[in-house]
Image (cartoon, grey):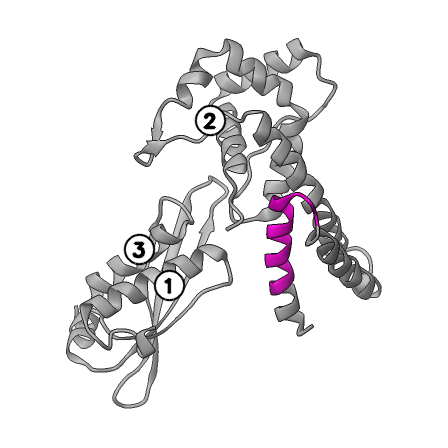
Amino acid sequence: MRLKKYFSRSKVRVCLTTDTWTSIQNINYMVVTAHFIDYDWQLHKRILSFSQIVDHKGDSIGKCIENVLIEWGIDKVFTITVDNATANTTAISYVIKKLNSWQDDGAVLGGKYLHDSIVAIRNAVKFVKSSPRRLDRFKNAVAHEKIGTKGLVVLDVPTRWNSTYLMLESAVKLRKTFELLGEEDIHYVNYFRDDENEQKRIGPPNCDDWDNAKVFINFLATFYDITLDFSASLRVTSNIYFKSWCTIRNQLNSLTTERDPLVSKIAVSMQQKFDKYWGV
């Protein structure tokens, strides 16, 4: 209560930092922290909110920040520090708009890689992994299709591209099994008829979705392999740094001119971030 009164009465601007992540149980969390200097020039850091959120989309993040500001009576924000995830651009724009609607000087100076095909496949994998009974039916379907793969599908963490790569790679190998579910499993069909967050659930994956998944797999394979090399803990990796850097740079240069618009669009955005980070 004392902190709320301080925010409502003082004229200091507050700096915010926020981060989101997904637990191993696939539950989304978000934390919002306030940083401010009091009248005695003492720096303070206070966690204002630690809560679950629906997803990692920009609108969801922006609305969560808005609710925190309203709850704590904060209407003067100096900065909001986030990572460079695409969704945060939408979130910050949303918050700036809200701050400026509350008062003229609410914000100082007035203050995308989630493809539907990935979402469709993720939802299909969620269905399979959501209960032991569904997983057993899926295993039976794999046996029925006589697919010679030892592994089963894995569910990704949406904010970790390497886990999305593994999910797509495993799912594509079992494409025929998912298609069989669509033909014979009424529970699977009804799952995609239900709404999710007041919107129609995306899926089931169709032919275009599976083709797009192959594109994403080919796109991410190089980055995944290099990440594994750098993550090695039982051998020296500093000697492969420059070669790997050049491999990524050349890969991005090549992919920006790809005929596939999906690949080229993502590659251009990645190259811009890559060049900005390394000062190229």
Q: Amino acid at mark 1?
A: Ile
- Which residue shows up at 31% across the image and 60% down it? 65
In reply to whether residue 261 is colored magenta, the answer given is yes
Q: Residue at x 38, y 54 (%)?
A: 30
> What kind of element bears circle 2?
loop
- Which residue bears the numbered disc 2? 130
The image quarter in which residue 54 lies: top left
Is 239 rendered above or below residue 29? below
Q: Nearer the viewer, mark 3 or mark 2?
A: 3
Q: Say which residue label 3 marks.
A: 64
| Residue at 40%, 50% in the rendered image | 29
Which residue sits at x=57%, y=13%?
180
Look at the image and tell me whether residue 48 can be seen.
no
Give me the C-alpha separation between circle 3 and circle 2: 27 Å
Q: Quadrant of residue 99 in the image? A: bottom left
Element type at marker 1?
Answer: helix
The residue that mark 1 highlights is: 92
The quadrant holding residue 192 is top left
Q: Position of residue 90 (x, y in %)?
A: 40, 57
Q: Amino acid at mark 3?
A: Cys
Q: Secondary structure at mark 3?
A: helix
x and y, in percent, of residue 51 in the image: 33, 52
The three-letter amino acid code for the residue at tag 2 is Ser
Please report the bounds of the magenta region as a residue range: 258-273
